[in-house]
Image (cartoon, grey):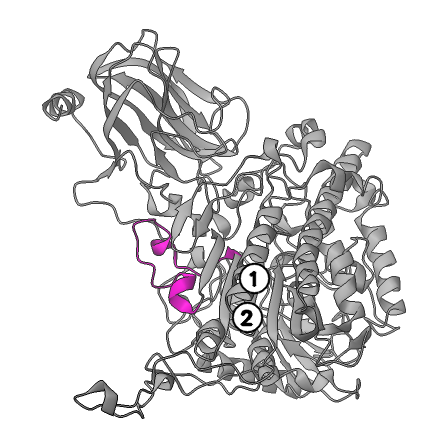
């Protein structure tokens, strides 16, 4: 609300009294702490060293030694939803994030748009004397706003943050990221061959931003949300960090689970009688084949070697990123800020099962529902973690790093929702190196930070009446009574139709996998666990307490109604691929693109999946040796590109990164002059893996000059990044025929058109004449 002007205004300034308090940002409360929230992706409780895991996290160990380690902190089982909870303090459906931003469905809880009635913590803190900074992943922008020319109303700077540097979307290539600074896309500052890695770049910018605040106003507190790409796929790391873990995981994921459980009990993370869950705990009729864990002793020696290496890469990625976080913490110590900084170090969901039972060198196969090729994966074992791969470990490591719990990310069993969280605040927490067992959830972080600062959540923010915070502060756990009873009373869970509800130490869970495609939710079997004593949810007490099951299931529906949870969606990945929101098709069916524009995210670009399409470029060649990219979308891990090389016109389709590339090359040179250069795909049928099968035809002006059988991938080329670019490729090239960028030179591109639709038709001769008329 606007503050009242309490000065005096007269005709003469000498008779007037100013009142700057009505206009300036109010100061933060006296002694208000800084806040550093470090949020990793895809990390189960058993992965990291503070919890007994084999992945060394020296910075996190340091934080834990100076503060508290939480054993019952919970998330939503998926990244966008958890992040929305941490941003606003509200439940994820209330924020419109029933699942990831790419999976919105147009229902109140499934919009991908955080309502203004759910103000972010940054919006509150900025109006109370804080600098607000966000570095790293942002998976909470609706996909129709990802475009450089789109609205920025849900980007960080519009939701309370002073600065942003990172990427928008679920993941990005750590060697060739899709970067945003503040409100615009930028090119990465340097390339991997010059030492680039995203984690390092993010730490560099975090330190720079903190330095800016420190030198501009040394007494002003700040809130920094640091969200690295780790540990989400692709798992990329410098070789020296990968090599640190050589042989560490050779005993396999089942042995790791047993080893980790013993260590977790020894460290008081889990009760002594905690039972290890089976690696495949769900009955066959409610389980998903893609989430199956292959028993270690069923693997051959090559598979064991490959799977172990995938875990080594993941571990190296995690530790390397922790070292970058350490640089930020070191800066705080060097500048005298560490003593009064609350550091929360955590992860957003359990370990990821998106790598399939066999793991992958290209995670994009999962998002295309395309089967793995073990022979291809084995052939690239020595390149895992490098720019050549987009790798992800198999489901066995997901269940290992989420031990001793059932399942992993996407599930509302503990394997999906129980996550690491350590908190330090030297000035505000006397206990050092202690463990806390109180039950808490991501929605409890905002109330905790506000209480530590000494602020109440306002009734109105930017004129919008605010919804109440459903969480409770964790600050009571900072005190001298480590066994204080949990002050949280209830928390519902729902993710991709997997469901649960915890109340006062008891939890019901619906027995089903995500993406099951079954529906009939009313017939689900509900399990009951006394989680105060049964952390791994192994002793189902539903038969002993049927009335309690009924009561808690009914209460789940009450919470579902309160927080916009319904409708439930358990459609398969293949079904969801077909309904992911994409850019509206222009009325004439033709998308138009121009040189000199920003890279267009794929979700905002022409929709060619499963369709016939035509690409037509109006090009004027002035140099006989003209070369470069005309249009490119995607990367070496999946994409297509139209370009000139050696005076020939090329069209390459990189089908989910599976070699060899599909290529068309003109037999004759492209001569100087005005041309319409293009390619088309004519779909004949759909394959059994949902790929479109047909033929590709290369065109110079109105003449077809080459054709070949072709197939196009069923899903997008990437979950994030590597969008459509005119006159250049993005940093990671689609084709091995050229290097990074490969800008067009020796002529000009006027316009590139893409026509889509199985029945779409363009008269090439007429279009050639139209191209000439524009010269």
Foreground: 620 or 509? 620
Farthest left residue?
Answer: 773
**For the residues bearing labels 2 and 1, Cβ distance under 8 angstroms:** yes
Label at residue 104: none
Q: Quadrant of residue 346?
A: bottom right
Circle 2 residue = 222
Q: Secondary structure at mark 2?
A: strand
Whether the magenta-drawn stretch holds residue 432 is answered as no
Q: Which residue carries the number 1 mark? A: 210
Q: Is residue 592 left or right of residue 26?
A: left
Distance (Cα) linking label 2 and label 1: 8 Å
Q: Is residue 212 left or right of residue 347?
A: left
Residue farthest front in this picture: 14
Q: Is residue 246 above or below residue 346?
A: above
Q: Position of residue 626 (x, y in %)?
A: 33, 15
Q: Quadrant of residue 285?
A: bottom right
List the single residue furthest toward the top: 668
Which one is nearer the viewer's eye here, 65 or 504?
Answer: 65
Q: Mark 2 or mark 1: name the one nearer the start of the chain.
A: 1
Q: Is residue 49 in view from this perspective?
A: yes
Relative to 445, does residue 468 appear above or below in the rendering?
below
Relative to 212, say whether 491 is above or below: below
Callout 1 crowding tier (Cα within 10 Å): few <14, some 14–19, many ≥20: many
Residue range of the region highlighted in magenta in the rendering? 136-160
Residue 752 horizontal/vertical position (percent) = 25, 31
**For the residue carrying disc 2, how many other residues have a C-alpha within 10 Å: few (<14), some (14-19), or many (20+)?**
many
Please tell me whether residue 34 is drawn above or below residue 765 in the rendered image.
Answer: below
- Percent across and percent down for residue 67 are 76, 73
Which residue shows up at 42% across the image and 28% down it?
Answer: 711
**Quarter containing the C terminus:** top left
- Magenta segment, principal secondary structure? loop
């Amino acid at each position: 609300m606007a503050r009242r002007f309490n000065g005096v205004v007269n005709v003469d300034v000498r008779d007037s009294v100013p009142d700057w308090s009505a206009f300036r940002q109010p100061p933060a409360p006296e002694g208000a702490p800084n806040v550093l929230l470090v949020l990793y992706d895809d990390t189960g409780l058993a992965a990291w060293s503070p919890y007994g895991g084999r992945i060394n996290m020296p910075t996190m160990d340091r934080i834990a030694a100076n503060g508290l380690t939480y054993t019952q902190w919970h998330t939503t089982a998926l990244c966008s939803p958890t992040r929305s909870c941490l941003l606003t303090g509200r439940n994820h459906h209330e924020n419109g994030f029933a699942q990831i931003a790419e999976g919105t469905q147009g229902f109140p809880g499934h919009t991908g748009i955080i309502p203004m009635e759910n103000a972010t913590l940054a919006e509150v803190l900025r109006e109370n004397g804080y600098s607000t900074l966000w570095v790293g992943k942002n998976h909470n922008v609706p996909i129709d706003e990802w475009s450089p020319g789109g609205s920025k109303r849900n980007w960080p700077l519009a939701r309370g943050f002073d600065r942003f540097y990172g990427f928008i979307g679920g993941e990005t290539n750590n060697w060739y990221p899709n970067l945003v600074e503040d409100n615009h896309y930028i090119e990465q500052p340097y390339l991997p061959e010059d030492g680039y890695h995203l984690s390092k770049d993010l730490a560099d910018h975090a330190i720079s931003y903190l330095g800016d605040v420190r030198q501009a106003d040394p007494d002003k507190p700040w809130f920094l949300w640091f969200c690295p790409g780790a540990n989400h796929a692709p798992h990329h790391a410098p070789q020296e960090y990968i090599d640190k873990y050589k042989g560490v995981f050779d005993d396999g994921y089942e042995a790791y689970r047993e080893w980790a459980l013993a260590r977790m009990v020894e460290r008081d993370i889990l009760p002594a009688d905690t039972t290890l869950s089976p690696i495949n705990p769900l009955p066959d009729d409610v389980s998903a084949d893609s989430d199956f864990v292959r028993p270690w002793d069923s693997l051959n020696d090559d598979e064991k070697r490959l799977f172990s290496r995938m875990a080594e890469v993941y571990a190296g990625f995690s530790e390397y990123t922790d070292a970058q976080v350490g640089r930020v913490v070191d800066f705080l110590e060097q500048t005298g800020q560490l003593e009064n900084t609350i550091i929360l170090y955590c992860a957003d969901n359990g370990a990821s099962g998106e790598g399939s039972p066999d793991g992958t060198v290209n995670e994009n196969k999962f998002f295309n529902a395309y089967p793995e090729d073990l022979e291809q994966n084995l052939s690239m074992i020595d390149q895992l973690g490098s720019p050549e791969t987009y790798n992800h470990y198999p489901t066995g490591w997901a269940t290992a790093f989420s031990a001793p719990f059932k399942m992993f990310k996407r599930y509302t069993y503990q394997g999906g929702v129980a996550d690491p969280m350590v908190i330090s605040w030297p000035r505000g927490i006397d206990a050092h190196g202690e463990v806390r067992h109180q039950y808490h959830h991501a929605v409890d972080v905002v109330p905790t930070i506000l209480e530590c600062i000494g602020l109440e959540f306002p009734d109105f923010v930017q004129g919008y009446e605010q919804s109440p915070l459903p969480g409770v502060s964790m600050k009571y756990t900072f005190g001298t009574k480590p066994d204080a009873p949990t002050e949280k009373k209830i928390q519902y869970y729902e993710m991709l139709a997997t469901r649960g509800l915890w109340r006062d130490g008891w939890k019901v869970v619906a027995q089903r996998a995500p993406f099951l495609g079954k529906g009939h939710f009313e017939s689900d079997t509900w399990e009951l666990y006394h989680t105060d004593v049964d952390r791994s949810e192994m002793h189902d007490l539903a038969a002993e307490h049927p009335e309690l099951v009924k009561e808690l299931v009914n209460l789940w529906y009450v919470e579902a109604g309160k927080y916009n949870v319904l409708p439930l969606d358990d459609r398969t990945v293949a079904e969801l691929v077909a309904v992911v929101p994409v850019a509206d098709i222009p009325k004439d069916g033709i998308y138009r693109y121009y040189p000199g524009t920003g890279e267009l995210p794929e979700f905002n670009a022409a929709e060619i999946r499963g369709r016939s399409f035509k690409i037509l470029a109006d090009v004027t060649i002035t140099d006989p040796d003209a070369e470069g990219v005309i249009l490119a979308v995607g990367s070496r891990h999946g994409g297509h590109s139209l370009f000139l090389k050696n005076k020939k016109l090329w069209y390459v389709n990189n089908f989910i990164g599976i070699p060899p590339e599909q290529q068309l090359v003109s037999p004759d040179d492209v001569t100087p002059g005005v041309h319409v250069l293009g390619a088309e795909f004519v779909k004949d049928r759909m394959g059994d893996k949902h790929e479109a099968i047909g033929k590709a035809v290369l065109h110079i002006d109105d003449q077809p000059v080459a054709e070949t059988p072709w197939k196009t991938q069923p899903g997008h080329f990437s979950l994030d990044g590597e969008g459509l670019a005119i006159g250049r490729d993005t940093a990671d090239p689609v084709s091995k025929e050229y290097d990074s960028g490969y800008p067009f030179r020796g002529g000009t591109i006027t316009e590139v058109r893409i026509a889509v639709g199985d029945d779409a038709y363009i008269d090439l001769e007429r279009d050639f004449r139209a191209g000439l008329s524009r010269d």
